[in-house]
Amino acid sequence: MLVSKSKKPLHLNMRKRIQIFPKDKKQRLALTKWLRENNIQFEEHESAFNPELVEKILAGKKSIEDGNFISYSPDVLWK
């Protein structure tokens, strides 16, 4: 058993972190409630993504899947 003479709490540095991605607000609230009940420290951060940009990207992917795009070959571009 390790006994400290200074009576300071022993803090271990974790080498790995876990990121959890809840699907909706209900899951996020359930996770935060569980973490608080089990006295597990956590931090909440705002998403770094711009929702409008994400919507545009997803709309572009959908239009490609639907076949609504124009393709240029290198021959056309260099004429």
Image (cartoon, helix red, strand yellow):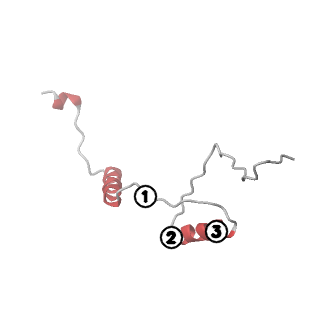
Q: Secondary structure at mark 2?
A: helix
Q: Amino acid at mark 1?
A: Ser
Residue in the image at 64% along x and 68% along y: 36
Taking 7 as reference, is 66 left or right? left
Taking 16 as reference, is 66 left or right? left
Q: Compare marks 2 and 1 and give the one earlier in the sequence.
A: 2
Determine whether label 1 and label 3 are within 8 Å by CB: no
Q: Position of residue 75 (x, y in %)?
A: 19, 28
Furthest toward the left, the residue is 79
Give the position of the C terminus as an image quadrant.
Answer: top left
Q: Quadrant of residue 73?
A: top left
Q: Position of residue 70 (x, y in %)?
A: 23, 44
Task: Name the residue that disc number 2 marks.
Answer: 25
**Tag 2: Cα neighbours inside 10 Å, few (<14), some, or many (≥20)?**
few
Task: Name the residue that disc number 1 marks.
Answer: 47
Q: Compare marks 1 and 3 and give the one earlier in the sequence.
A: 3
Residue in the image at 55% along x and 67% along y: 28
Label count reads 3
| Distance of label 3 from label 2 (alpha carbons) | 16 Å
Taking 65 as reference, is 70 left or right? left
The answer to whether residue 52 is above or below residue 71 is below
Determine whether label 3 and label 2 are within 8 Å by CB: no
Residue toward you, 47 or 58: 47
The answer to whether residue 52 is above or below residue 4 is below
Q: Compare marks 3 and 2 and give the one earlier in the sequence.
A: 2
Camera-side mark, 2 or 1: 1
Task: Name the residue that disc number 3 marks.
Answer: 36
Q: Amino acid at mark 3?
A: Arg
